[in-house]
Image (spheres, rainbow, N blue to C red):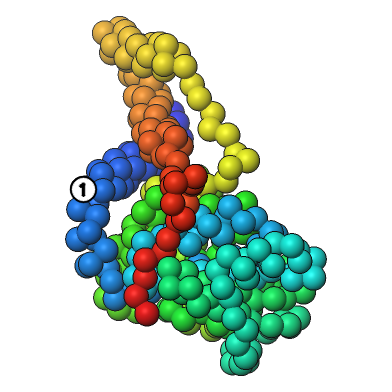
Amino acid sequence: MLMLFVLLLTVAVSASVMLFHLVRARNKRHLLAGVNGLACEASDPVGISVLCSSRGDLAQIENLLAVEYARYEVVVVIDALRYADCVREIVARYRMIGVEWHASLELPTTGVRALGRSRKRCYRRLVLVDRASDTPEGDFNAATEVATYDYVLPVRDHQYLRTDAIVRLAVELGEHPVGAVSLVRSLMGEPATLLSREAVVAAGGFESHPLRQIPSCARIALYEPVLFCKKCRTIRIPLLLQLSGAVMLVSGVVAATVVGWWPLTAVLLTLALVWAAAMCGKLTLNDLSEEVPIGEKMQGKLPVKNFTKS
């Protein structure tokens, strides 16, 4: 009986903590949505470089470039020999110009053939790295070598940014002293991890798993999604089934309490907390599952622009 009580208490505490963080993150996101301009201004000192290991997905690149945040850039690593048609389209669309590659030797980087930067004003934050394909970790190392800002966000193939994700990450960083946070990790939806560039360099690159070397005091857990994948589908639970589950749980708790079956009451209350946390997480994902990906909102009307400062 004691073991059962300890187990129920552990599950109940974990579910309560998760529920608290989910509700807090959801309320904070809605608050920031109403003061988007103030959030951008307040978090302006924080710079973020998105590192994209691309396999020729032009829609993904357009999505990443559509972020309206000042201190932001997109570093795309792609094999120009393997995806020649895609690279030609990128060069023509964003008016890329070749620049010299100056490796800093901070990270193990091989296979880089050329480096390009966009000169079109509305896409000035695009950097294109031509590198022979091998592993995403190798691509991220090459992208980190040329990244401008102190924080990097690795994005793999077929991953897209959610609306205001960059501003949301910048706000989280802005709430702590400069340099105090080395990692912001999203615990919802598609895996996403924002890393300090210094932490990646200190670890010796992405192959060395820099996440394992960052202490817990320098980590932030974000209880809302940052990235999404078009290939992933949201699991939907019918509303009637949700209401039926809630009614059954409430009825069970009331009945067990009236009869005096306290162990069963404790079990049902724990299940109710777990159910509430799961439903709150589902609401968080569903709030963003129907949104139009940034970069596609203006498709067919006007070119999507990335308004940034030099």
Q: Residue 188: in sight, yes or no? A: no
Q: Residue at x 34, y 57 (%)?
A: 168
Picture layout, residue 249 above or below residue 176: above
Q: Quadrant of the C terminus?
A: bottom left
Q: Quadrant of the N terminus?
A: top left
Front in this rendered view, residue 276 or 249: 276
Q: Which residue is mark 1?
A: 34
Determine the image quadrant of residue 5: top left
Q: Residue at x 55, y 82 (%)?
A: 146
Picture layout, residue 18 above or below residue 278: below
Q: Position of residue 135 (x, y in %)?
A: 73, 67
Along the horizontal axis of the image, is 105 left or right of 199? right
Picture layout, residue 210 above or below residue 201: above
Badge 1 amino acid: Gly
Determine the image quadrant of residue 266: top left
Determine the image quadrant of residue 87: bottom right
Front in this rendered view, residue 167 or 308: 308
Q: Residue at x 58, y 34 (%)?
A: 233
Q: Position of residue 40 (x, y in %)?
A: 27, 63
